[in-house]
Amino acid sequence: MLVRATSLKNTLSQYLVDRITSAPNIEVRTCTEVTALAGNDVLEEITLTDVRTGRQSTVRTNWLFVCIGGVPQTEWAQEVGIVRDEGGYLVTGPDLQEYRANLNWPLERAPLHLETCVPGVFAAGDVRHASIKRVASAVGEGAMAVALVNRYLNSA
């Protein structure tokens, strides 16, 4: 497990830190970043860089899971008028009713479940207000968003 920061404690609950550090099959490397990916048809290796020393190492692997943090990074949405909650998460579907003062919905129909306040713009996964914040949920919402985009396009 690679951690860009100096510790897991800044981003995880203590019970998770304890479980990870006590697991015999998990090595935690702090202050380490993935700086290169390599492979032909599939991923074959990753290059890791220790940000303190600049030392690089190569690890052979066919898998890489990236979790880049819990900050939604939705400043762009505010600039285009998409309603966000106080934490910066995108508000969608029925949850938009809570933000009625900020809602300028131009259509006669209500927003679809994952639709933002901009018709035809959908949000799925962790970036969405009141999401479950789990990979399986994000994948499911992504599949659902594809179906809703098709529904939107077919009704336009």
Image (cartoon, grey):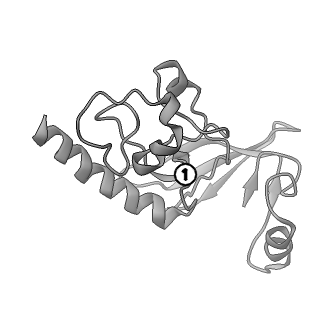
In the displayed structure image, the side of residue 6 where residue 135 appears, left or right = left
The secondary structure type at the circle numbered 1 is helix
Residue under the point 88% across and 38% down: 52
Amino acid, disc 1: Asp
**Residue 66: x %, y % from top left:** 59, 52
Residue at numbered disc 1: 126
In the displayed structure image, the side of residue 68 where residue 156 appears, left or right = left
**Residue 57: x %, y % from top left:** 72, 49
Work out which quarter of the rendered image holds the N terminus and state it. Answer: bottom right
Q: How many marks?
A: 1
Q: Quadrant of residue 60?
A: bottom right
Residue 10 versus residue 48: which sits nearer the camera?
A: 10
The crowding category of the residue bearing disc 1, from other C-alpha atoms within 10 Å (few below 14, some 14 to 19, many at least 20), is many
Work out which quarter of the rendered image holds the C terminus and state it. Answer: top left
State whether residue 146 is above or below residue 25: above
Residue under the point 31% across and 57% down: 144
Residue 56 versus residue 89: which sits nearer the camera?
A: 89
Residue under the point 46% across and 20% down: 80
Q: Quadrant of residue 12?
A: bottom right
**Residue 75: x %, y % from top left:** 59, 26
State whether residue 109 is above or below residue 107: below
Q: Residue furthest top?
A: 79
In the displayed structure image, the side of residue 96 where residue 7 appears, left or right = right
Residue 37 versus residue 145: which sits nearer the camera?
A: 145
Q: Residue furthest front?
A: 101
Residue under the point 78% across and 67% down: 27
